[in-house]
Amino acid sequence: MNVGTGGRVAGVLLGSALAVLGAAPAIAAASTATEGPATISAGRLILEPTARGYQGSVPVTVTNRSGAAEYYSVRITEPVAGSFQGLRPTDACAFAGRVDDRRIVECGLPGPDLAPGERRSFAVTFEVLTAPRPYAMTAADGRVEVVPGHTGQVADGEDFPTLFRSTDGSLRHPRPYVRDTEARAAIGAGVGPVELTRQADGTYAGRLPVTVRYAGDAPHDYLAVLATLPGGLEVTGTEPQDAPSFGGWFEVPGGQLTAGEERAFDVLFRAPAGTVAGDLGTVELTLSTLSGADEVRDADPTDNVLRVTLDAVDNG
């Protein structure tokens, strides 16, 4: 799945696997050369208001100035933390560090090796999950750099300006975009115990409908929940389900949430065969907001924890 459909990049998973990739050391950038084996140029990024935050792309062109066909990668510094979505046409990408909390992403140049003198254009797409404003805004410049595969060193680089278009279509008199630094996530559910009913194989299964709300626009890659369970019980997943659960950990389905978004899903529980019908104890669900390998501090952690009683029911 590509980034832009739940925070993942083609060829490299950038959702839950981001905990691994995000810990990789940054790739040291060489100083930009005025003359070199390749050049790169970029336009400006205009982020357009949509029903889901802002979306936009910046056009980029790479030129092979060497005398041989060459593979290139492109290094991108996103202008807004958490905004990078992918390339169009797509290619594999991986995180390569951070600067001022903004991610540095390294991607293959789409297509085959670049012939001598050949130019190739593509777009880098971005999404900022915040409520559209009635005024234009500006953010830090992003940056693109080209790296010849045989050297691993930056051959050329260029900054690109970033503007948010207002809801009335204007780019004039932009104000600085200021994003939340703390998450404002919450988890809730209906009142009453969750019933796990006996199945044909003797196990017990049940589901808990929950709702997760994301009130602010702090950058994040995904939300996850840790279930602390009574002995013998397990979480088998969610419905709908985007990613597998690991032990008591599971992702909130649907990827990143935009400011003010609410998402409902079911958490699925199972108790082993031989479980005695009756009160099984209490499950505790703790919601976390994650950016790479790091947990984003929450402004009010008291609404990040949900406790629910589980009952086993034998209808036979």
Image (spheres, grey):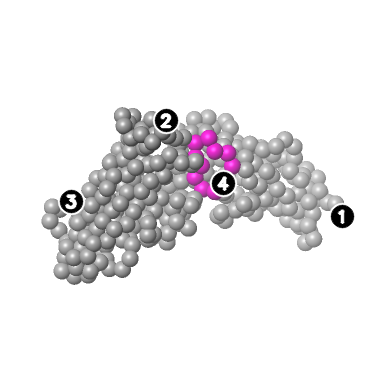
Q: Find residue 161 and name its label.
A: none
Cα gap from disc 2 to disc 4, whole angstroms: 31 Å
Q: Does the stretch in magenta take in 262?
A: yes
From the image, give the main secondary structure of the stretch colored magenta. Answer: loop
Cα gap from disc 2 to disc 1, whole angstroms: 61 Å
Residue 289 x/y as whole percent: 50, 41
What's the amino acid at mark 2?
Answer: Pro
- Pick whichever of labels 4 and 1 is earlier in the sequence: 4
- Pick whichever of labels 3 and 2 is earlier in the sequence: 3
What's the amino acid at mark 3?
Answer: Thr
Residue 178 x/y as whole percent: 38, 31
Q: Residue at x 58, y 45 (%)?
A: 226
Q: Which residue is mark 4?
A: 252
Q: Which residue is mark 1?
A: 316
> Which type of secondary structure does the marked residue at label 4 adopt?
loop
Q: Find residue 32 and name its label.
A: 3
Q: Which residue is mark 2?
A: 134
The segment highlighted magenta reads 254-263
Cα gap from disc 4 to disc 3, whole angstroms: 41 Å
Q: Residue at x 42, y 34 (%)?
A: 167
> Which type of secondary structure does the marked residue at label 2 adopt?
loop
90 or 189: nearer the eye? 90
